[in-house]
Image: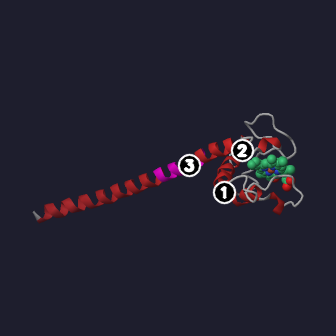
Amino acid sequence: MRTALALGLSLAMPLLVMSSLAMSSLAMSSLAMSAAAHAQSGAAEGQKLAFDRGKGNCLTCHEIKGGDLPGSIGPKLENLKGRYDRAELTAILNDETVRNPSTVMPPFGRNRILTEQEISAIVDFLQTL
Ligand code: HEC
């Protein structure tokens, strides 16, 4: 009886450990998936805001993949992820006059043309370019 119980326990323990490991890796992967989904929806929202003539209006000055009738006052926005991190892109959108006092790019954050959340979504989008 005792040996049967001990045997049962020794079989059950690794099973328990294995299933809790499986559960936690499942939880981890669904977390990672929801983070990726979040970034994706942020990027889609950011693209809308960037192209919206009443919001970011970025196409007035920048050529951007997927956007119509761009202007050429600013540089083409491409390969940004390789050149700027998130904080730098946020700073450029918040107030480019900090980097370049004579820029014509509007200080979207400082002037409250865009909210912090809107800037964050646009940065998600810029990081896909
Ligand atoms: C009125 C024109 C204008 C508008 C509108 C504008 N920009 Fe700019 N942007 C510029 C110019 C000019 C530069 C070049 C750097 C400078 O002037 O400091 C620039 C630079 C940048 C850079 C750095 C690019 C690089 O390759 O180094 C990013 C990123 C950027 N803009 C994003 C945006 C986004 C996103 C929007 C819309 C929310 C936007 N800009 C709207 C004029 C504009």
Residue ID for mark 1:
116
The residue under the point 15% across, 62% down is 5
Comparing 5 with 21, the one in front is 21
Observer-side mark, 1 or 3, equals 1
Location of residue 111 (image quadrant): bottom right
Please name the amino acid that badge 3 sits on.
His
First along the sequence among labels 2 and 3: 3
The span picked out in magenta is 30-40
Observer-side mark, 2 or 3, equals 2
First along the sequence among labels 2 and 1: 2
Q: Position of residue 4 (x, y in %)?
A: 14, 60
Residue ID for mark 3:
38
| Count of marks placed on residues | 3
User: Within the magenta stretch, is there residue 19?
Assistant: no
Quadrant containing the C terminus is: top right
Quadrant containing the N terminus is: bottom left
Vertical placement of residue 15 versus 50, above or below: below
Q: Residues within 10 Å of mark 3 (few under 14, many from 20)?
A: few
Q: Which mark is residue 50?
A: 2
Please name the amino acid that badge 1 sits on.
Glu
Asked if the beta carbon under badge 2 is closer than 8 A to the nearest atom of ligand 1, the reply is yes
Question: Seen from this angle, which residue lies furthest top?
Answer: 68
